[in-house]
Image (tube, rainbow, N blue to C red):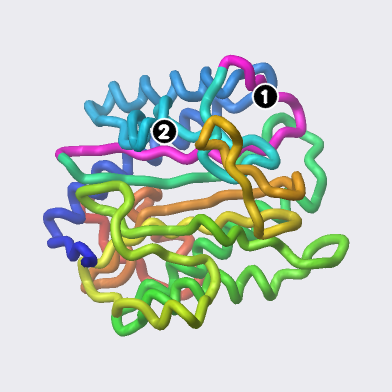
Amino acid sequence: MVQIKSPEQIAKMREAGLVVAAIHAATREAAVPGATTKDLDQVARKVLAEHNAKPNFLGYGGFPATICTSVNEVVVHGIPSDDVVLKDGDVISIDCGAIIDGWHGDAAFTAFVGSGHAPELVELSRVTEESMWAGIAAMKQGNRLVDVSRAIETYIRRQPKPGGGKYGIIEDYGGHGIGTEMHMDPHLLNYVDRRRGKGPKLVPGFCLAIEPMVSLGTPKTEVLQDDWTVITTDGTWSSHWEHSVALTEEGPLVLTSPDAGKAKLAEMGIVAAPDPLG
């Protein structure tokens, strides 16, 4: 069952989303050479405490940290550790969430540590982020879930990969519904699988965490012995971008973006829904 939210409930999710945005800003600044991924987890804990918010990752299915820190070939669910020290040239994806009054926010971004990154890595992150926005733009009344998947896949497939070949759209992980729980129905693929049909119609109150994960090589992944860390099977590096988005009567509202998605959607010719928090 898809949970449909009222405007008042979406406003609460916006509060949680702004906490997530604050965590992103703080951890992005802290992701420098010499920092450990455990340091970034501590930064996130401090932001949550400052906003009287609860973490939704800590303890989820036994996950032992507040955020996921996925470095280089790690696609998702990397566990923060004192042993993982960021170095110049690394790429890190940080995934995190927050709970306010029982309502969840969830978002991820990819950051570059230090300088001197290969152009293909910069382009990988750009393509992944822009495919997320293509999916957000497909959050329209009358569309179906598959239209969001198609928008993400189509954008990625149309981008030339430096050096040739194709980007790997990660197959085993995707987006999801969000609301009173972090992961809810429906599951959102980042590509079209005709066996799954068109999925539910998008109506006001429909909320999705849209999160493409893309690698420079394979779409295949494996889970390490810690039962969490997901890596590409060929060792190629990856990127992960995510926003939580609500569809309202007035259009999409990007719950985890500081400006509710207004500027980026305007570039795409789309009017974002008014921010319920002003």
Disc 2 element:
helix
The residue at the far right in this view is: 163
In the image, taking residue 102 as reference, residue 83 lies left or right, namely right
Three-letter code for the amino acid on which mark 1 is drawn? Leu
The residue at the far front in this view is: 225
Q: Which residue is depicted at the point 30% across and 47% down?
A: 182
Tell me where residue 229 appears, x and y as whole percent: 56, 37
In the drawing, what numbered circle is on residue 86?
A: 1
In the image, taking residue 225 as reference, residue 247 lies left or right, namely left
In the image, taking residue 104 as reference, residue 261 lies left or right, namely right
Task: Say above or below: 43 vs 110.
Answer: above
Tell me where residue 203 appears, x and y as whole percent: 24, 75
Tell me where residue 143 appears, x and y as whole percent: 36, 82
Task: Say above or below: 34 vs 159.
Answer: above
Disc 1 to disc 2, C-alpha distance: 18 Å
In the drawing, what numbered circle is on residue 23?
A: 2
Q: Which residue is depicted at the point 52% across and 25% down?
A: 80
Tell me where residue 30 appears, x and y as whole percent: 55, 24
Disc 1 element:
loop
Q: Is 93 covered by the magenta stretch?
A: yes
Three-letter code for the amino acid on which mark 2 is drawn? Ile
Q: Is 228 covered by the magenta stretch?
A: no
Q: Which residue is depicted at the point 43% across and 77% down?
A: 196
Query: Could you say which is closer to the camera, residue 251 or residue 109?
Result: 109
Q: Quadrant of residue 28?
A: top right
Q: Which residues are magenta?
A: 82-101
